[in-house]
Each structure stands twice: as structure tokens, then as C-alpha cells.
Image: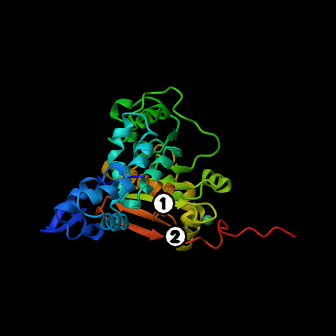
Amino acid sequence: MRLALKPALSRSWRDSDTLQFGTVQRYAGVVERADKTLCDFLGLLDGTRERPELLAAGERVGLGRDPADALLDELEQAGLLDDADAVGAALGRYPQPHRDLLGPDLASLSLVHSSPGAAPAVLARRADLRVEVRGAGRVGAALAAVLAAGGAGAVTVVDNGRVGPGDCSPAGLPPGDVGRLRATAAREAVQRASARRPAPSGGRVGKGPPDLVVLAPRDGSGAFAGGTYAARELLRAGVPHLYVGVVEEIGVVGPLVVPGVSACGHCLVLTREDEDAAWPRLLAQLADDGPGRARTPACDTALATAVAGLAALHVQLYLDGLRPPSVDGWSEISAGDGMSRRLRLKGHPDCGCLWQPLPPPN
Ligand SMILES: [Zn+2]
């Protein structure tokens, strides 16, 4: 393991001999008694040396072997060190020029996953992930592109029909795509975002179900609706899935359903029904506006972009092994006041999705 000070962290002097790594004080690491000798030693942490070489160098610059050893431990515990070999190996999973684009993403991961080599391991795992996005509207196409940019190895977008003006957004499908097949346009958006050359097949298609499915219906009221037939299929197959959409002036991210572990879309329907007995009746009519009524579903571009970004973050957090707030809950962003809030969702006792299976008979 070749040790390097994390390039994500800024370096500034708190006073004449106290060095602070990082800008946000809550997370910053501080090195005290940072004299010239110590700074010379820190300069050697550039990812070209293994620990034994560093200890020998510590002796050479006049710091001493044991103090150098203790300092390395301290820096590691403060989350300031990364493993340059692992960084190289993780980025090596991606073709150029995507590799260069991922530098800042990996720098960010290095702050979230702090021990040396942890962040590169997370990025390397992302290279093998498959995510399916259903719906290539203003939210879905942007979300797919963001996930691809963030390093998800294969992002497929499922949709049919042709791109309409309401599907376009600066983060997803450009206005020049109006009239093209939505699935093709979305595939190209994903390829652009990950700087890949267009491939007619749509990239790598792995075996088995994807690691996660995002349900991003173009008319966001579908995402608000919860337990659809497609969602039940995913639940049965044990595939984690996330509801995302813009409903009128509200952006919704969640719930992220981990089958058998967290509350599902049907739990949400039942919870809404407890609060509003007419909800199932309204739900049944969502798709049908009746004859002669042209409807333009509301979808603010800024809101849709925020929702796509937030949803991509939640997907990444979950697939990186953390628990985003859309598990057993959902996040809402309002176009009315720009506020975001998180709401809790409990498994509904009548749903059954969290019932434990009976033990097998002896
Ligand atoms: Zn449920």
C-alpha cells in the first residue's frame, strides 16, 4: 500500500505550527507541532512510497522512525490517508476519458469512506453495478445520465415512444432529441455522460436482475402512486427499487424499497389510505383524464434536476453500502419554497412485505 495524503483535502495553517486538513471544521483533521521537518515528511506522502520506505525516510529527514510511525497512525485515524495503488486500480476499471472525469467523484468518496483504500474499493464496485431506470422523461433520463457519470458500470433505460418537449432537460435529453425514440435518446445521454463511444447494443448487458431498478414514470403521479404491478414483481424477485418523480409542484425521492427489509410502495399506499379513505379511488383515476382534456403534467426543470440529482445520490449511497434516507421514508422537495424534507414510512401491518417467512417444517 503506497500512502498518499488525500488530494480532496485543502491545507491551511490554524496558527504558526498547527496545520488543518480540510475546510469544513467538523470534519477537518489537525496536525499539531507541524515544523519544517514534519512538513518535509508530509511532502513524502505523495503515493509513491510504502510504509517501510516512509519510516526510513522519516529517519532521513530527521523526524525519527518511531515518531514517523506514530504520525502515520494519527493521519490514518484522522481519515487523511489513502492508498494510491487502490486508487490507480479503481480508476483503471474505467476507460479514458471517463477515468479523468471520475477524479473529483473519487475525491468525494475518499471523504465519505475514510480508511485508506476504502473509497477506491467502493468505486471499483460501482464499475460492476447494473442499474435499470424505467422512464426517460425529465427526471429519468437525467438520473440515468448522472448515475452513469458517477461510475455505475451499466445503466439501462427502459421506455417506449418518442421524445416530447416535456421530456427534455439540460441534464438528460436535449431539445434536439424531440421526435426521436426515447430509449435511443436516453441511451445516448448515458453514453455522453460516461464519455463512451456510441454502441448500437446499448452497452454491457449482464445476466440476471439488475442491482437496483429506479421507477421514474414520465408522469410523476405514477411514482407517487406506490405499489404498482411492476413494483410487486420487483418485490417478489427481491430487486431493490426506488420511486422517483415530480408530482405537481413536489419532487419525490423514495421510498427505496429493500425487499423484506424496508417498507414498500404498497405500504405507502396503505398508509395514505389510512389518512385519506378516498385515496385508492383517486389513485385508480390518475391515469385517466377523460376525453377532450389535454393535460400538461407539471414539471419544473430546476425541480426535476434537483430530484434527479438527489435520487442518484440515494442510489449511490445504497449501492455503496450505506443507508439513504429514502429507506423507510422518502424525501420531498417543493418548487413552492425550495425546501426539502424527509418523511418517515413504516412498514404497514396489512401489507405483508415485511412478514417473516415461516420456519421450514422439521
Ligand atoms: Zn409493504
Q: Position of residue 65 (x, y in %)?
A: 32, 63
Circle 1 SS class: strand
Q: Position of residue 173 (x, y in %)?
A: 38, 37
Foreground pick, 266 / 9: 9
Q: Position of residue 220 (x, y in %)?
A: 46, 52
Q: How many marks can you see?
A: 2
Left/right placement of residue 13 relative to residue 41 reads left
Check the image and name the residue furthest to the left: 16
The residue where tag 1 is placed is: 254
The residue where tag 2 is placed is: 345
When asked about the image quadrant of residue 31, the answer is bottom left
The quadrant of the picture occupied by the C terminus is bottom right
Check the image and name the residue furthest to the top: 200
Circle 2 SS class: loop
Between discs 2 and 1, the one toward the N terminus: 1
When asked about the image quadrant of residue 112, the answer is bottom left
On the question of residue 167 being in view, the answer is yes
Dots 2 and 1: beta carbons under 8 Å?
Answer: yes
Query: Mark 2: which amino acid?
Result: Leu
* Disc 2 to disc 1, C-alpha distance: 10 Å
On the question of residue 139 being in view, the answer is no
Foreground pick, 228 / 330: 330
